[in-house]
Amino acid sequence: TVVELVQHRCEARASRNYAAADALKERLEAGGVKLQDCLGGGTTWEYSVSRRDGGGASPMTALARSALESHTDRAAVSRLSDEALALCAAGEPLLGRVAADAAFDFALAGCESAPLLESLAAAQAAEFERWRRPQPLVSLQV
């Protein structure tokens, strides 16, 4: 989870292993996590939703973002995960990257619902298949 990665980064900084700390920081920031180092060695973090368009969020996206914002409240994450699983079971269309982004957000929030994450993975696989187009075979000549 994000909390564990931030903790590992703090430990790396405390032991002056700056290469490892920087690698963890890059990994977290690539996932949309904004870090703020504090005096005394601690680090606070927040999820930056700026990596997405933010407009017209689907119900699944709204649930996933809420779970991420509630990452410190396991009961809330569990409740939101159950709602998301019900949405999957109801056949909510998850077009484009919605399923992948939702799975990522739920995982960062600490979701432990394997059925939800499997449903999101299956939905994203179906979306990939929907957009699949035959690609021409190109040979590389050296």
Image: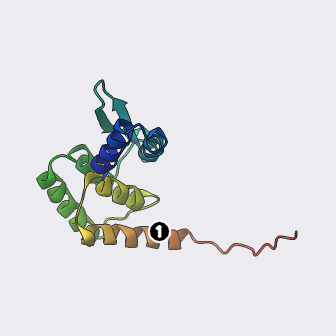
Nearest to the observer: residue 103 or residue 87: 103
The percent position of residue 10, horizontal first and vertical second, equals 33, 39
**Residue in the picture at 29% in, 53% down:** 64
The chosen color scheme is: rainbow
The percent position of residue 6, horizontal first and vertical second, equals 32, 43
Left or right: where does residue 32 sit relative to residue 76?
right
The percent position of residue 62, horizontal first and vertical second, equals 28, 49
Picture layout, residue 111 above or below residue 89: above
Picture layout, residue 12 above or below residue 125: above
Dot 1 crowding, Cα within 10 Å, few <14, some 14–19, many 20+: some
Left or right: where does residue 120 sit relative to residue 84?
right
**Residue in the picture at 34% in, 36% down:** 14
Q: Give residue 60's quadrant in the image.
A: bottom left
Q: Residue furthest top?
A: 39
Q: Give residue 91's quadrant in the image.
A: bottom left
User: Which residue was labeled with disc 1?
Assistant: 127
Q: Residue furthest right?
A: 142
Nearest to the observer: residue 66 or residue 72: 72
Quadrant of the snapshot with the C terminus: bottom right
Q: Residue furthest front?
A: 15
Number of marks in the image? 1
**Residue in the picture at 26% in, 72% down:** 115
The percent position of residue 54, horizontal first and vertical second, equals 39, 41
Kindly tell me whether residue 43 is visible in this rendering.
yes
**Residue in the picture at 35% in, 48% down:** 57
Q: Secondary structure at mark 1?
A: helix
Nearest to the observer: residue 70 or residue 92: 70
Left or right: where does residue 83 sit relative to residue 142?
left
Amino acid tagged 1: Glu
Kindly tell me whether residue 90 is visible in this rendering.
no
